[in-house]
Image (tube, rainbow, N blue to C red):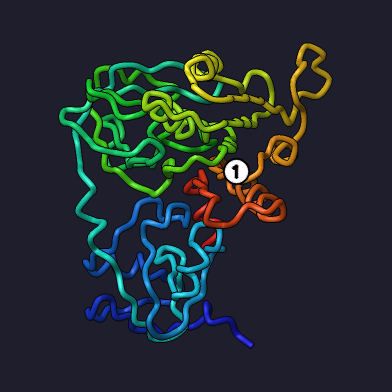
Amino acid sequence: MLSFLNSKKPVSAEINGRAISVSPKETLLQAALRQGVEIPYSCRVGGCATCKCKLLKGRVKELTEASYILSDEELDQGYILACQSVPQTDVRIEVDLSRVAARRTVGARIVEQARLTHDITRLRLRLDDSLAYKAGQFAELSVAALPGVSRNYSFATAPRLDSQLEFLVRKVPGGRFSTLINEQNLVGQSAQVVGPLGDFWLRPAEAPLLLVAGGSGLAPILAMLEDAASNGVSRSVSLLFGARQPRDLYALDEIEALRRQWQGRFRFIPVLSEAGGDATWEGERGLVTEKIAGVLEAGSHAYLCGPPGMIDSAVALLMQLGVTREHIHADRFTTLRDSLAAAA
């Protein structure tokens, strides 16, 4: 039997009453944007849920698993991710357009670049105007040195009165944008920030916090902790930070300052997966997800940020340990290369 992906026949999609044509292998989001139909979106790779919409009629093929980012209630109600859904039949969907209005485009200037590790650079910008966002969210960033190219990065700082903000940019092999940020001096150049995007932020509660970060996924976790500390949050915190080698650890002074400022219990545990025979490393070794069970407090709410494999493993383990889906919040750091591979 031939897969529907081999079909050459377009199908129809009705979005909020407007009909469009969807070509073979095309996602709902791609078709909508191609034909000028507004759908909220940001990451385009199924990692943020910004493009979630309600499937009212028809069937779609989902390119990636959506259960990690959509709640059980949303799945039961027929919600899908437009960026990951290829229609198998004519479909009808409903989109909440109210989320588009919150997004703003703000000019900025790069005021500092600082190398944190061999492949992560901190980029500090001064905005031309204020931009309201929640610590943990992300934005679409573009720079004058690379016109027409933009990438998504989490805010690495809580909102500040001086209109300055930071992003942590990890160099991706073959990535034009991340290579530029990590290898060329861009201080003084203009940039543009579009946001806020995403629904990853700290929900109000009194439950203990389990925070798990991998690589540059530490950025939104730092922003959330900074914001929470400034607001006197005293929830018990267990922060697991996964990296490969000692040279991949960073922001240790910032985390120590947060620990001292925190009004409740604060545990920080860095975990190295490739410490190997490094006798100087006296900390935890292995995969960061292997350490979750040992630090998880009863009734914890979990916030996870990092590569997809880490997120998927952590979510599965947390659910086995009794953490409900509604109390697991995740932000998958997915690259454009990952997206292309999923759609192939």
**Left or right: residue 304 compared with residue 148:** right
Q: In the image, 51: left or right of 325?
A: left
Question: Which residue is at 30% across, 69% downward?
Answer: 95
Place residue 320 in its image quadrant: bottom right
* Total residue callouts: 1
User: In this rendering, is residue 63 above or below 246?
Assistant: below
Please say whether residue 179 is visible from this viewpoint: no
Residue 293 x, y percent position in the rendering: 73, 41
Most foreground residue, 62 or 225: 225
Q: Judge whether 277 appears above or below 288 on screen.
A: above
Q: Position of residue 324 (x, y in %)?
A: 60, 56
- Which quarter shows the N terminus? bottom right
The percent coordinates of residue 255 (x first, y second) are: 53, 19
The answer to whether one can see residue 163 in this image is: yes
The residue pinned by badge 1 equals 300
The quadrant holding residue 200 is top left
Front residue of 40 and 34: 40
Residue 329, relative to residue 73: is it above or below? Answer: above
- List x then y, in percent, for residue 246: 67, 19
Please identify the quadrant where the C terminus is shown: bottom right
Which residue appears at 58% of the width and 81% of the height? Answer: 3
Relative to 258, is 284 on the left or the right?
A: right
Q: Secondary structure at mark 1?
A: loop
- Note whether 123 is above or below 69 in the view shown: above
